[in-house]
Image (cartoon, rainbow, N blue to C red):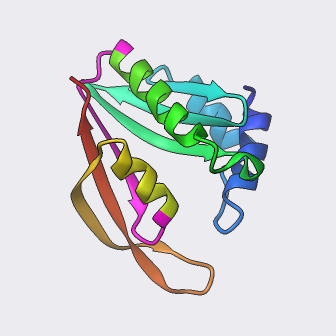
């Protein structure tokens, strides 16, 4: 997927927050530590450094939700991370994002940390970021 397509899908998937721009995606895709996993209707963007993989973002077309694409993308992301030498994966998620949290927990991720009042919402309130991790070995 090209940066413009990634940005468009990200914007539709993250309508309630600031989506990433085409320039941001282009910059990440130029980074040799980053990798992209795609399936029709979604993508997962990760980064692998020193044996650890970080899920930077995952996006599923809102019209394709509740069809298992998130689980497929997590499997593709983890497979790509292992191929790049990652032994552990981590991510960060808004503690109030129940659907995403359910996806990650059902895929074997556990809470390993919390960043208090990390996310700022459009209405001004703040929510915690949960740091989740999983062994890939």
Residue placed most toward the observer, 22 or 78: 78
Q: For residue 85: magenta?
A: yes
**Rendered residue at 49%/25% (across/down):** 76
Q: Give the quarter of the image for residue 116.
A: bottom left
**Rendered residue at 62%/50% (across/down):** 66
Query: Which quadrant of the rendered structure holds the N terminus?
Result: top right
**Rendered residue at 47%/66% (across/down):** 98
Q: Give the quarter of the image for residue 37.
A: top right
Q: Is residue 92 above or below residue 68?
A: below
Q: Is residue 72 visible?
A: yes
Q: For residue 3: magenta?
A: no
The magenta segment is 83-98
Q: Is residue 111 above or below residue 116?
A: above
Question: In the rendered view, does 98 fall on the left or right side of 4?
Answer: left
Q: Is residue 49 above or below residue 103?
A: above
Residue found at the very far front of the displayed protein: 67
Where is residue 73? Give x, y as percent. Answer: 53, 33
């Amino acid at each position: 997927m090209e940066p413009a397509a990634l940005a468009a899908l990200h914007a539709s998937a993250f309508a309630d927050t600031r989506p990433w721009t085409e320039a941001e995606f282009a910059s990440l895709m130029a980074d040799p530590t980053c990798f992209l996993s795609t399936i029709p209707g979604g993508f997962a963007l990760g980064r692998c450094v020193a044996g650890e993989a970080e899920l930077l973002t995952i996006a599923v077309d809102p019209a394709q939700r509740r069809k298992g694409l998130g689980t497929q993308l997590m499997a593709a992301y983890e497979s790509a991370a292992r191929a790049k030498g990652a032994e552990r994966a981590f991510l960060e998620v808004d503690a109030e994002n129940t659907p995403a949290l359910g996806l990650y927990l059902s895929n074997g991720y556990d809470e390993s940390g919390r960043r208090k009042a990390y996310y700022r919402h459009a209405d001004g309130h703040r929510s915690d970021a949960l740091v989740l991790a999983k062994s890939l070995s």
